[in-house]
Amino acid sequence: MRVLNLSLDSSVLDKNSVSAKRILEYGYWSEKYFVVAPNKENKELDLSDKVRVYGSGGNNRASQLFNIYKKSEKIIKQKKCDVITTQDPFEVGLIGLLLSKKFKIGLNVQEHGDFFSQKYWRQEKLLHFFRYFLGIFIIKRADNVRVVSQRIKKYLVENLKIEKNKIIVVPVYTKLADIKKFEKNKNSEFIFFNLGRFVKQKNLPLLLKAFARVVKKYPRAKLLLIGKGPEEKLLKNMCAELRIESQVEFLDWVDNIYDYYSRADTYVLSSNYEGWGRVIIEATIARIPIIMTDVGCANEAVINEESALVSPVDNLDKLAQNMMRVMDDCGLRERLAKNAFNSVNQLPNKQKTFELYKKSWELAKK
């Protein structure tokens, strides 16, 4: 099968990037795999004899999207593609829909972010409000939809009335690593850990407010935030206002993130929405307990009170309460971590994951 991927990730044009290495895997499951991604440069790159990636060219978003359409049109004509897969149901989704209708080939749309079921995403900015309706329009017309969680599938079926046979669920594959837990003495700081972009989606102000309540009862608590983003200054100012600067540490991205997972006592996710939440899977691999809002893989890969403590989205009282519960109860921490690790081991392995990707292309082609 010849697959054309309309991507949003320009890093695929770097042979050494994680994205490029992942794309090579897709090539194994197809006859030919072509990727077109936004990039200022108009370039082509062979990652293997089966995988070729193309940079759109263009100095701004609008020109890059136009060039993605024109370049994809040319590729479909020359390479005789069987199916188009788009990385989101919005701008590149629209390009995919137009091309699939023009050339009468299958369209597979990916939905990684759970954009439709939560109000928070479409309230973040005016553009998202319009993209919300565009996405619904496109998903309803796709031949197949690939989602990362049962949560997303359920919403699409029950609320958007998408045929369930058109939707295939493929959780985000995360390689299981052998992580040695860092041994700490009883008097060490209790470290809450969060990794991600400092953006509205992650609702880190909620986490800081909850942590401020925790500190009043447990002065030895510490919060480690690893990442970067536009809200960094706001978050640091909040720490000063809440008088927790000495107990909150900000760090930039690091190469070996598992060093921090192994030293943490609990992972906390405070997001307003997530498609899956890869960091949650990484935390379970590191065998640390998880506190999270009811997003992404919550009550799917991990279950409330069994393998995680799950609180409603944007609920300060419940999040703070759960953070204090894990500090109070060593047995609870051990039980949650053990059950979560066992649960994640039941997720599809690498081969099964790529077999499901291939199945989604085949369904779209039919």
Image (cartoon, grey):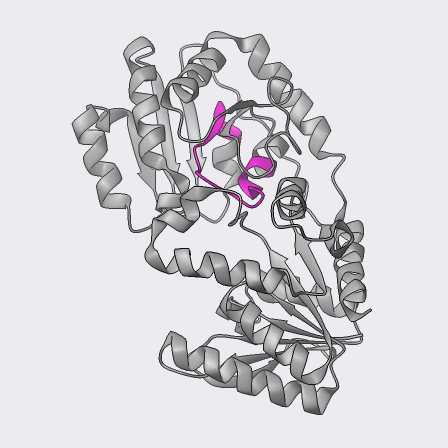
* In the image: residue 42, left or right of residue 169: left
Whether the magenta-drawn stretch holds residue 47 is answered as no
Q: Specify the segment rendered in magenta.
A: 262-281
Q: Give 242 or 164, whichever is nearer the viewer.
A: 164
> In the visual, does 67 lie left or right of 220?
right
Q: Nearer the viewer, residue 134 or 314?
A: 134
Vertical position of residue 204 compared to residue 190: above or below: below
Is the C terminus in the top left, top right, bottom left or bottom right quadrant?
A: bottom right
Q: Quadrant of residue 154 in the image?
A: top right
Q: Is any atom of residue 196 visible in this view?
A: no
In which quadrant will I find the N terminus?
A: bottom right
- Residue at image point 39% right, 74% down: 61
What residue is drawn where x is 69% and y is 90%?
A: 77
Expressed as whole percent of the image width and height from the top left, the position of residue 232 reads 27, 44
Q: Residue at x 66, y 33 (%)?
A: 300
Q: Nearer the viewer, residue 282 or 300?
A: 300
Residue 239: percent from the left, percent from the top?
23, 30
Q: Is residue 198 above or below residue 292?
A: below
Is 82 situated above or below 203? Answer: below
> Is residue 148 visible to the viewer in this orientation of the structure?
yes
Is residue 274 shown in magenta?
A: yes
